[in-house]
Each structure stands twice: as C-alpha cells, then as structure tokens.
Image (cartoon, grey):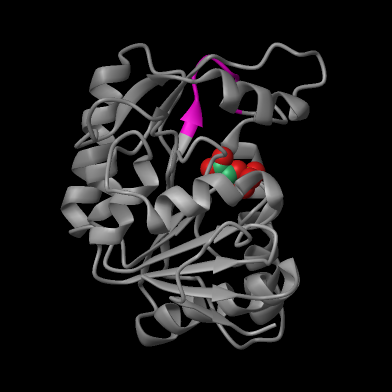
Amino acid sequence: MEVIILKTKEQIGEAAGKIIAEVVKNDPAAKLGLATGASPVPTYKYLISKYASGAISFKDVSAYNLDEYCNLPRDDENSYYTFMRKNLFDHIDIDPANTHIPDGNAADPDAECARYDALIEKIGGVDVQILGIGTDGHIGFNEPGDSFAPGTFKIKLHESTIESNSVYFKNGDMPRYALTMGIGTIMRAKKIVLIATGKAKAGAVKAMIEGEVSPACPASILQTHPDVTVFLDEAAAELLTGNHAKREV
Ligand code: PGA
C-alpha cells in the first residue's frame, strides 16, 4: 500500500485524477471502476477539466460503479445513477451505453448481482478502481461482518452508514438496502486508488492500514492487494503511527 498525505481535497483530486488519466491515456478503451460519495468528487472535477482541455477522451472508456441503493427510483436525486451523471458522465464524452451500475430496483436482486458479476468477469476486472471508505471501514457497501463477500450482493446497510448518508435525504427516508460489488469483485481490480479525508475517517483509516486483515474492517483486505494507493489529508491520517506514509504537505 502506498500512503500519500496531501493538504487539500483539491490536491488529492488532482493526484488521484492523474492516475486515472494515465490509465486512460495508456488504453483509450480502459475499464474504470467508479465510486460515489463526496471523496471522489474532486477527482472527477480534475478528469472533467482534462477532458475539457482536450487532454483526454472517454469515448471508448467503460465505467463500472461499485453500488446502488435498492428501492430508490433510478432518477431520484440521491440515486447513484443520478450522482454519476451529475458529477462526471454529463460532462465528458463517455458513451452512456458503456456506463454500468447495479440496478437497485431489479425484481430479482440475486439475478441482477449475478448479471453484474458476469459483466466484470467478462472484462477480467477493472483496470483501476476508485474507492472511498466508510467511517465503519466499508468499501463499496461492504459493511463489517464475519466474512469477505466474494461477489456482488444485496446488503442491509449498517446504522453508521445510514447516519452518514441520511444527510443527503432531505425527507429522511434513506434506503436501508443496497446492491454492492463484493470484496472479491473489488479485489479483481488491477489497480486501486482509495481516498479519505476528514477526522471522521481517521479510525477507519488506521484500521485499514495498521489493523489486522479482517472482515471486521472490510477495507483492511486492501493490505493484500498488490497495487493500492491511498490518498489522505492530515485529519484522516491523524491516528496513523507507522512511518509508512509519504507526507507531501
Ligand atoms: P464519502 O463516502 O466519500 O461520502 O465520505 C465514502 C463511503 O461511505 O464509502
């Protein structure tokens, strides 16, 4: 794991964005694993600026998102389908047909999860996966538990996740279930970039980097992946005691 500590969210967005842009430059038909939430937004802003300046094109790129809420209309302002359009897809030249996200409204969630896994199986895993981390150590919506999920599955969200994400739901009725890539699906990515900022993430970040590899902190599995870059700000890094982090502040 390479751990890089930067001062601002914008610096992190630029540094993470450069990694993604490099993957796309090397392979114009790159397969990108994308994430929602506040953490990747500056990265998406950087990629949009590179597209606007003509430096990169997403014309032949395909995107595979980590997760989606269940029982939320696809066009709801809080769906991850809407999030991706608003924060990235509407501002670049990606073909909407090449953007993939689990269907949280599928009548048969198990069949939908199998369909999504088959899609990722077919491409042999994404080239690069962007991740945030939950305050409870989740990645995607893989909540702490007794085992690492091998493939995409339906999860009941934990209270801490509902608490963190309910701020976005003005009327308060946030979905309780989601479909998410499993840890096995995420670990198939050839390269992983994880972003965490703010004090609220410090405990989860410490468990991910310095704790034992355990499904009690799903992100800790990333210690066993051969190509992970973690971008942190000072607040998210404040509980780290090892000297593994490269401080660039
Ligand atoms: P955030 O969410 O980027 O909005 O903090 C991360 C996550 O819960 O995975």
- Judge whether 172 appears above or below 199 on screen: above
How far across and down, in percent of the image, does residue 109 sit? 32, 18
Choose top left, top right, bottom left or bottom right for residue 47: bottom right
* 3 horizontally vs 173: left or right: left
Question: What residue appears at the point 30 percent right and 13 percent down from the top-left corner?
Answer: 108
- What's the magenta bit mostly, secondary-structure-wise? loop
Residue 119 in view (yes/no)? yes
In the image, is residue 236 part of the stretch drawn in magenta?
Answer: no
How far across and down, in percent of the image, does residue 245 sit? 49, 75
How far across and down, in percent of the image, does residue 134 sit? 54, 40
* 196 horizontally vs 123: left or right: right
Choose top left, top right, bottom left or bottom right for residue 138: top left
Judge by depth and name the residue closer to the eye, 40 or 30: 40
Choose top left, top right, bottom left or bottom right for residue 143: top left
Determine the residue located farthest toward the front in the rendered image.
Answer: 241
- Start-end of magenta stretch: 68-74
Question: What residue appears at the point 53 percent right and 76 percent down from the top-left corner?
Answer: 4
Question: What residue appears at the point 70 percent right and 77 percent down from the top-left corner?
Answer: 11
- Judge whether 211 appears above or below 75 on screen: below
Q: Quadrant of ligand 1?
A: top right
How far across and down, in percent of the image, does residue 86 sit? 71, 48
- Judge whether 184 appears above or below 46 on screen: above
* 180 horizontally vs 164: left or right: left
Q: Which of the image's four quarters has the N terminus?
A: bottom left
In the image, is residue 73 part of the stretch drawn in magenta?
Answer: yes
Residue 64 in view (yes/no)? no
Question: What residue appears at the point 70 percent right and 82 percent down from the top-left corner?
Answer: 249
- Judge whether 189 appears above or below 27 on screen: above
